[in-house]
């Protein structure tokens, strides 16, 4: 089997069996073969779902401090 044939077979098997991962690898004799690896559940690809558009975020709230408190030096709120 050539490298291209092994890679194509690995893709075909991967589409048929999504719980396993298939790769093409070269043998000691120079031929190519398909190897399979079982993936743990946390590494498996799940089918993609359509995204949900987020609505615009509200503008930040106004600063509740008075003008004098905002201009006062020290800690926030003029406490220092």
Image: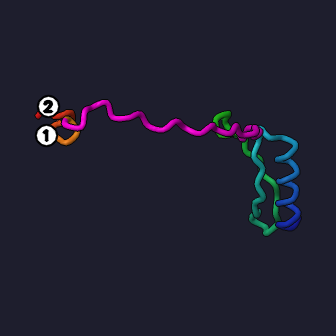
Identity of the residue drawn at 79% across and 69% down: 30
Would you place residue 2 above or below residue 65 in this image?
A: below
Question: In the picture, residue 60 is in which quadrant?
Answer: top left
Question: In the picture, residue 54 is in which quadrant?
Answer: top right
Q: Depth check: 72 or 6 in front?
A: 72
Disc 1: which residue = 74
Would you place residue 17 above or below residue 34 in this image?
A: above
Q: Depth check: 42 or 2 in front?
A: 42
Magenta-drawn stretch, dominant element (helix, strand or loop): loop
Identity of the residue drawn at 33% across and 34% down: 63
Give the image's coloring scheme: rainbow
Count of labels shown? 2
Do residues under tags 2 and 1 come within 8 Å of each other at their CB atoms? yes
Of the numbered discs in the image, which one, if any, rests on residue 1?
A: none
Q: Is residue 43 left or right of residue 26?
A: left
Disc 2: which residue = 79
- The span shown in magenta is 45-68
Using the numbered discs, state the Cα–Cα distance from disc 2 to disc 1 in whole angstroms: 7 Å
Q: Is residue 19 left or right of residue 59?
A: right
Magenta segment: does it hold 44?
no
Instruction: State the SS at label 2.
Output: loop
């Amino acid at each position: 089997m050539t490298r291209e044939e092994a890679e194509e077979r690995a893709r075909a098997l991967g589409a048929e069996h999504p719980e396993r991962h298939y790769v093409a690898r070269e043998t000691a004799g120079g031929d190519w073969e398909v190897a399979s690896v079982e993936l743990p559940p946390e590494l498996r690809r799940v089918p993609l779902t359509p995204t949900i558009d987020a609505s615009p975020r509200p503008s930040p709230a106004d600063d509740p401090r008075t003008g004098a408190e905002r201009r006062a030096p020290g800690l926030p709120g003029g406490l220092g």
